Image: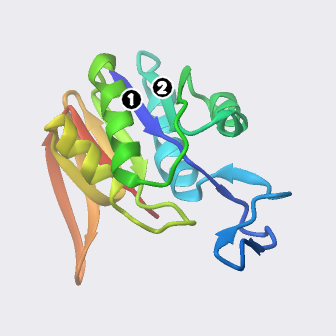
Amino acid sequence: MKILVCISKTPDTTAKIAFTDNNTKYDTNGVQWIINPYDEWYALVRAIELKEADASIALHLISVGGADAEPILRKALALGGDEAIRVNIYGDDSFVIATQIAEAAKTGGYDLILTGKETIDHNGSSLGGMVAELLDLPYVSLATKLELNGSTASVTREIDGGQELDEVPTPVVISAQK
């Protein structure tokens, strides 16, 4: 089994926020970048747990961005990833980012693609759904629990007023949250 975890860089939540260009552009000077918490704490950590339970799982990471994304990829590799892919494109457009991830995933033969539910700097919650659509794969959003049973993913997710259990065949795209 091969798992691809989408990793994005976001400003550290303790970073001082400043703006330039007449208060129209975020000033990134001196900002400490971290792995987006939803990507790290929920998608990456769950993928690492799955890999620890089954040594045959290959865990790959992908990030779309410039060279400044390399430190977060190195951290994710140190946490338990096997390989990392960095697509060298700058920008904030979710569709462009999803397209790049989908293109890389097409050649990777991934059984499971995990994303965080959103990034803490843009809060778009759209990337996972777009990647799934571009790959013509099933998509489960807002996952709070994930178990693999052969080629089936058992996913518990939040819905209005409760929880829902979905059984979905792999390959599948899942966005994770607490």
In the rendered image, residue 157, in percent from the top left (x then y), is placed at 28, 63
Vertical relation: 42 (above or below) 66: below
Is residue 21 found left or right of 112 in the rendered image? right
Residue 125 vs residue 173, the one in the foreground: 125
* Element carrying mark 2: strand
Indicate the amino acid at tag 1.
Ile
Residue visible at 61% across and 29% down?
80
Is residue 2 found left or right of 26 in the rendered image? left
In the rendered image, residue 114, in percent from the top left (x then y), is placed at 38, 43
The answer to the question of whether label 1 and label 2 lie on touching residues, with beta carbons closer than 8 A, is yes
| Residue for badge 2 | 60
Q: In which quarter of the image is residue 70?
A: top right
Q: How crowded is mark 2: few (under 14 residues within 10 Å), some or many (20 or more)?
A: many
| Residue for badge 1 | 3
Residue visible at 47% across and 25% down?
59
Q: How far apart are marks 1 and 2 (CA)?
A: 6 Å
Closer to the chain start, of discs 1 and 2, is 1
Q: Could you tell me which quadrant the N terminus lies in? A: top left
Q: In which quarter of the image is residue 25?
A: bottom right
Residue visible at 41% across and 21% down?
57
